Amino acid sequence: MVQVDLNCDLGESFGRYQLGEQREILQYVTSANVACGFHAGDPTVMRETVKLAIEYGVKIGAHPGLPDLNGFGRRNMAITPQEGYDMVVYQIGALQAFLTIHNEEMQHVKPHGALYQMASQDRELAEAIAQAVYDVSPSLVLFGLSGSELTKAGEKIGLRTAHEVFADRTYQSDGSLTSRSQADALITDQEQAVSQVIKMVTERKVTSRQQTEVSLQADTVCIHGDGEHAVEFAKYIYETLTKNNISVTAISR
């Protein structure tokens, strides 16, 4: 049976700002990427998110981002590879403390937003992030865009690496995601999104915006938890994958 992980970005509320329906979406995902305070999240939100994920049996990973609360970590910043390394180590450590008090192991690390996209294309930054993850714990899984510099860096250093694909994003002919600045970056139709996922998981291909077939590896599928119909979509994709004899299982299982 074909197997795939379903991951979702969670813990992205901050102070009085509330984002997403965490308890509901945790019923349908197998891995949670928990914001570590730089692009979103705060200590209380981190603690509550970790507790909820454990309650639902969902594996937990750190979701380190750029220090940009106002821009939600989605704006590029000019950082050095060393700064990228330090940011990732720092944020993994913050989340690890909350996992430690619950005697729970961290499964993975997935950079967020602009940091993720930058590392997908910048080899030096990608290698710095992979080194940071490895130095904290070689047993951690590194999540990165399928076929990107980040997954290459993870594999090169000896980390277990999960090639990630996106349910609700369109692709370019080089395998990159369409920039959010473009009108056709997001897929809002549920059936179209799920059809894309099934093709990526079973055929290892995606149709780009240029109508070319792009080969990729799909170990884990990202679904976003902050959309208007996030819970409804998470349920729909989980049930459709299962009906198509695709086992939805965490990377570490």
Image (cartoon, helix red, strand yellow):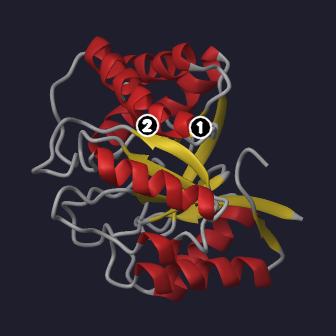
Q: As shown in the figure, which amino acid type bears the numbered disc 1?
A: Met
Q: Where is residue 26 in the image (x, y as percent from the top left)?
A: 55, 69
In the displayed structure, does residue 227 sit left or right of residue 99?
left
At x 61%, y 44%, the residue is 163
The residue that disc 2 covers is 95
In the displayed structure, does residue 35 sit left or right of residue 207?
left
Element at label 2: helix
The residue that disc 1 covers is 106
For marks 1 and 2, the one nearer the N-term is 2
Q: Is residue 252 visible?
A: yes
In this picture, is 149 found above or below 11? above
Query: How dense is the environment of label 1, judged by Cα within 10 Å: few (below 14), some, or many (20 and up)?
Result: some
At x 56%, y 47%, the residue is 60
At x 39%, y 75%, the residue is 21
Q: Single out the residue that lies furthest toward the front.
A: 101
Q: Single out the residue that lies furthest toward the left.
A: 70
Query: How dense is the environment of label 2, judged by Cα within 10 Å: few (below 14), some, or many (20 and up)?
Result: many
Q: Where is residue 172 in the image (x, y as percent from the top left)?
A: 41, 56
Indicate the quadrant where residue 169 lies.
bottom left
Q: Position of residue 130 (x, y in %)?
A: 50, 22
> 159 or 200: which is nearer to us?
159
Count of picture labels: 2
Indicate the quadrant where residue 53 lies.
bottom right
In the displayed structure, does residue 3 sit left or right of residue 251?
right
* Image marks 1 and 2: residues in contact by CB distance under 8 Å: yes
Q: How far apart are marks 1 and 2 (CA)?
A: 9 Å
In the displayed structure, does residue 236 sit left or right of residue 90?
right
Q: As shown in the figure, which amino acid type bears the numbered disc 2?
A: Leu
